[in-house]
Amino acid sequence: MPPVAETVLDEVEAEGGEDAGPGPRTGATARRGARAAGAAALLTAVLFCLATALSRSHPFGPVTRNVVDLGQQYLPYHAYWRSFLRGETHGDAFLNWNSGFGANFLGDVGTYLSSPVDLLVVFFPADRIELALYVVTAVKITAAGAAMAALLLRLRPGPWPVAAALGTAYALSGWTFNFGSTVPMWLDGLAAFPLLCLVGEWARTGRRPVLGPLVVALAWIANFYTAYMATLGAAVVLAVRLLTAEETATARRRLAGALRAARSVLVGVGLAAPLVAVVFLGTKTADPTPEVTFAPAAWTDVLARFLPATASTASPALFIGTPALLLALTLPFNRAVAPRVRAALTAAVVLVTLSLQWEPTHLLWHAGASPNGVQYRQAFVLCGLLLIAAWFSVAGGVPRPAALLAGGALLGGLAWAARGSVDIDRWTFPASGAAVLLALIAALLALAAARREPSGAVGGNHRDSTGTAPEAPTGDNRENSTATARQDSARTALKAPARPARLLPVLAVLLLVAAQAGEAAVTGKRIEEQQRAEVAWSPRTGPWHEAAAREVARADAWPRHRTDPGEVPGGNDVLLVGGQGADHYSSLTSETTSRTLVSLGFGAYAKGRHPVTLDNPVTDALFSVGTRMRSEPAEPVRQDAPPRATVTATTVPVPPLVTVRPSARPAGPSGDSAFARQERLLGASVYELPAPRRTGRALAAHCPAGSEVWFWAPEYRGTATLAGQRPVRFDGKPPAVSAAMGALGTVPASGEVRIALDPEGRARLPREPVGCLVRARLDTAVDRLTATGATRVRTTGHTVTAALPPGSTGVAVLAVPRISGWSCAAGDADLRPARAYEGLVAVPLDGRADTVHCSFRPPGLRLGGAVGAAALLALAATGVLHRRRSRG
């Protein structure tokens, strides 16, 4: 059973509450909670795997699951996380030497890898990383289902099989299939929402003052982004409970409960501050994405997303299963539920739904910044609220026919209004119709069973005017109440209905589960199929990646020089196969890294947050890339098979990782082209930069015979072909994609350069799109930098120490982008924030020091540590005060 369920059950068994029902809480109550959580976990896991199998996706089929960022970010990061945990990387928790020529790893840990579930990757072999990530995803989804089932029974007693079914509905919502399963870090928020609601329950009733903040801290450490949304959603649930529960019927008790909840959140977030602060400050220095103006989705599309088998990133994923939605829609009309409970829960659902579509509240849900891509990331909170509403309507018994008819009418109107949406799939209405039919049969069976039960039998729809069970007896009355309960049980046993009647509730639950399960499986299948057909995907890992990893391991000479794995399908190559290349795809990719590399001719995706490798001898010299891998694919890359390729390694002399330049101001030609910037950073003129003549779709220029023609046009999309050579593809698409500099071929003996352009759309070229590289000049520059550079370089997890030739003056340049967090010193001087030399880390030299030392510390770590220490003291004080009050 998941730890979440064990925590909840411990609380349920140990302490009573206003919804506990007659008599003290017993082991039987705990067992019901355990059954609900366990059944929800099992059913969720089976259905998630079934949906994967039906879509023929790995690991239950041959087709890749690696769509969009699942293949570009999360798979590579989990591969690196496994290697890091096993001590197989050059970096440490502060710095990742493999990516972006040196990246802030602690920020990436807090963004992608800080969930405790992610530790499971360490138990899988390196060639089974896709299976490891699938297991991590399934465990997170399963934990969310178990947590929701346990929460429902904590909010209100009821039949545990129904709680299990609704917990599964939450875990396998449309949000999970459409967004969460391909962005595994968001799944921690899915599990956090019911846990934080439980923290609210503890705060409301004055219990668990130490455990509550610890749960908050765990949620915010696992993924603070979605935990923030889950915290807002839990606040909505807490507000409903404060307004409707008997214990908080007075203003004083409501205020006390709210203050206790605020204390739990503040202390919990403070405990998570050492990681949260690093991520927060990392976002401040990250490459900025273009501002997004929120445009609400059409209401037709919003309504369609409540239905099965719908997928879109432009509208909120709100499917929870048609039977569960029907139960939620019956709540406003279910007179067996107290009026104030109906009103408060209904208002909460309506207001949260409206908040998805209003820009001020949209920004509130997303911490003030409208996100790129998926704009309805908070939709899982609404899914949870709908399921809580469904539970309150069904916990005491099946809603009466009038409520069912009213809820069915609302459901029919919703489906009718959504019929014209572009998100409707051919499976939507057949799946929904079948589920409604099964749900109605289940309701009829349950109603028939209720009518056959004797009056007063357990399980009927009997509630008092508040919608809660009678208050539990206390003190001396407890013994008499227990005896009376036993007598009532004996009398009920004598009046027990016949076996066929006892089977009716079982059949009803089975039909409900079948309806929910069938819709979930169909929805998961169709969403995976639609995503593979409509969005970018990466192939499965396989022979190509394994061959590249073997070659990298064989040639790796770090820190003498870098080894770049070249292009491997999937992106973030170095995290998958090793090496120390430029590839780095992260939400926290530093603006310094992105701008520096793009300005030097590197390509970039994801609006600059994914710089990629550049096979160029000048940049290889600048960044000490001594060994470069090149791959020759054996076949086209396909969705249903891992790719194969021949991988070769080439090693050339390059300057060391630390070089010495004559001054802090780089020498070289003026100009803003990538060729000019490379030369300034190199300190030598190695290109001929002709002024090409453009006639129609052709460029003409003159260069030294035998030099190499390079074409640079970051915004160009199409092909460029040097006369007599093969076309070279460029994929510029501003602002999302910057095309990398590319080699077109060798200048003929005549010196004439003619380049034919075949653009897709308008050909946007810079002022200097052509550079002709003279290798002899480059070799001379490399020899000079090697002779004056470091004689020895040593690195640890996040430090670099270099020995320099005696009497070195000018500036020592570390071939690492000068991102925030670097501090350096020459000789025995104290570390100070590093300077920058054309975007790289620099240390001034005065001729007296023969060593330089640089160290990286993630920004925000010191501040976060101070806040975390203060929160820990507050938590300890809270525990001491609570114990004293308990003893008193």
Image (spheres, grey):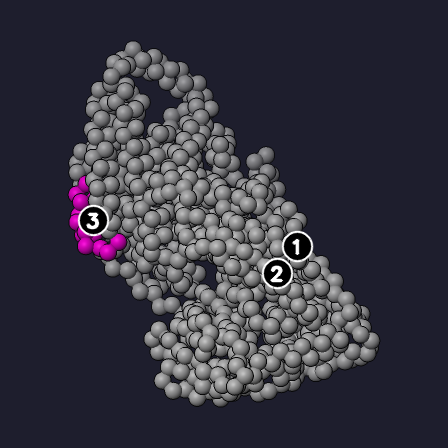
Q: Secondary structure at mark 2?
A: strand
x and y, in percent, of residue 21 in the image: 37, 28
Give the foreground label among 1 and 3: 1
Q: Nearer the viewer, residue 854 or 129?
A: 129
Under tag 3, what secondary structure?
Answer: helix
Q: Do residues under tags 2 and 1 come within 8 Å of each other at their CB atoms? A: yes
Q: Is residue 158 left or right of residue 434?
A: right
**Horizontal placement of 162 versus 405: left or right?**
right
Say left or right for 244 vs 622: left
Residue 415 within the segment the image draws in magenta: yes
Q: Residue at x 50, y 50 (%)?
A: 541
Residue 42, image x, y percentages: 42, 33
Q: Is residue 581 magenta?
A: no
- Report the disc number at residue 649: 2
538 to 596, vertically: above or below: above
Does the image show residue 506?
yes
The residue where tag 1 is placed is 554
The amino acid sitting under disc 1 is Arg
Q: Amino acid at mark 2?
A: Ala
Q: In the shown orientation, is residue 106 left or right of residue 255? A: right
Residue at image position (41%, 48%) is: 640
Residue 577 seen in the current view: no
Q: Which mark is residue 414?
A: 3
Q: Amino acid at mark 3?
A: Leu
Q: Position of residue 224 (x, y in %)?
A: 50, 54
The numbered mark at residue 74 is none
Q: Which residues are magenta?
A: 408-423
The tag earlier along the polypeptide, 1 or 3, is 3
